[in-house]
């Protein structure tokens, strides 16, 4: 649980000002976090969809990557 989540969960009982002081968090930072919650949720959903797509493509390709039939890299070791 983040400090932001803690303040959000307990603000009804103790007030935002007091909680932010106790957890060393600016009120403006807390309210910015609240305001951007929908964007964070959308990004998390998009990332999850992309992860599923990558895993599907990887599984369909026989769990390989890169062009098929290409030899291993012959770059000199450093």
Image (cartoon, grey):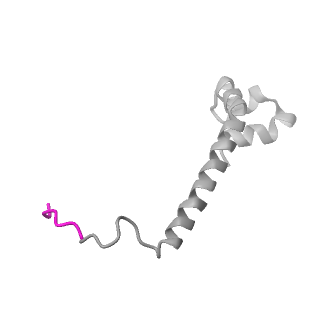
Q: Position of residue 9 (x, y in %)?
A: 79, 42
Nearest the eye: 23 or 61: 61
How many numbered circles are shown?
0
Q: Is residue 73 left or right of residue 23?
A: left
Quadrant in which residue 36 is drawn: top right
Q: Nearer the viewer, residue 34 or 55?
A: 55
Q: Position of residue 67 (x, y in %)?
A: 34, 65
Q: Position of residue 18 (x, y in %)?
A: 75, 29
Residue at x 22% of width, y 66% of height: 73
> Please, what is the dominant secondary structure of the magenta stretch?
loop
Q: Which residues are magenta?
A: 72-78
| Residue nearer the viewer, 67 or 48 | 67
Residue found 81% across the figure and 35% down from its top: 11
Q: Quadrant of residue 24?
A: top right
Where is residue 29, by image quadrant?
A: top right
Residue 58 drawn in magenta: no
Residue at the spot 65% in from the left edge and 40% down from the top edge: 40
């Amino acid at each position: 649980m983040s400090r932001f989540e803690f303040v959000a969960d307990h603000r009804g009982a103790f007030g935002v000002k007091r909680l932010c002081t106790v957890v060393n968090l600016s009120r403006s930072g807390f309210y910015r976090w609240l305001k951007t919650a929908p964007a964070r949720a959308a990004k998390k959903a998009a990332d999850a969809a992309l992860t599923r797509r990558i895993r599907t493509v990887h599984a369909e390709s026989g769990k390989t990557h890169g062009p098929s039939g290409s030899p291993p890299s012959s770059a000199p070791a450093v």
